[in-house]
Amino acid sequence: MKCPYCQKDNDRVIDSRASEDGAAIRRRRECSACHYRYTTYERVERTTIKVIKKDGIREPFDRLRLKGGLEKACWKRPISDAKLEEIVSAVENDIESKFESEVESHYLGELVMRHLRKLDQVAYVRFASVYRQFEDVQDFVDELRPMLSSDRRGPTNETDL
């Protein structure tokens, strides 16, 4: 493994442990040249699942792209990187267990939103605003209405918004 800092190919594994519910091995490494420490993950190589976009284009599922979207939605929220990794792994495991080769982007988006809604309401609304392409404030109100009506502390009808 090449060091991400000095690019030398001379490191040692300091620690290994199961990660992501046993779906990956997390390894802490130290470069023998510059002593920089970094983390790598070893996962089973899986079959490539294609995501069918709204316009019909098919693209390979990309866990890094999914994680990037989650990071944007969770920006400045008290959510750890480990929690985001859990969501990405859960989504990836779900689609790989239910679909052989292709999954519609609509299914993927709704699945991510279910996880975010449980985790953080602000991140959920941020993700929903991009995923559902909100165009005005009414779109936000429509998305928030079910959340507010189920939350006893919040307003229960439109006039309270």
Image (spheres, rainbow, N blue to C red):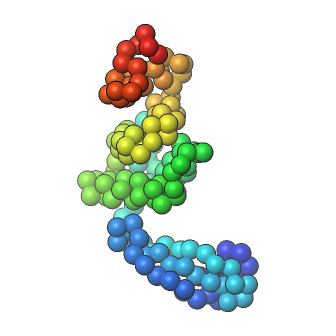
Q: In the rendered view, would you say 42 is above or below 100? A: below
The reply, left or right, for residue 33 in relation to residue 84 is right
Q: In the rendered view, would you say 151 is above or below 22? A: above
Please tell me how many numbered marks the rendered image carries: 0
Classify residue 119 by image quadrant.
top left
> Relative to the observer, which residue lies in front, 18 or 41?
18
What residue is at 50 percent from the left and 36 percent from the top? 122
> Relative to the observer, which residue lies in front, 33 or 104?
33
What residue is at 41 percent from the left and 54 percent from the top? 87
- Is residue 118 at least partly visible in the picture? yes
Q: Position of residue 81 (x, y in %)?
A: 52, 58
The reply, left or right, for residue 98 in relation to residue 11 is left
Classify residue 31 by image quadrant.
bottom right
Q: Position of residue 123 (x, y in %)?
A: 49, 40
- Is residue 100 at least partly visible in the picture? no
Q: Position of residue 112 (x, y in %)?
A: 40, 45
What residue is at 27 percent from the left and 58 percent from the top? 97
Quadrant that contains the N terminus:
bottom right
Q: Residue furthest top?
A: 159
Q: Residue furthest front?
A: 153
Q: Residue furthest left?
A: 98
What residue is at 60 percent from the left and 45 percent from the top? 76
Classify residue 74 by image quadrant.
top right
Q: In the rendered view, would you say 120 is above or below 60? A: above
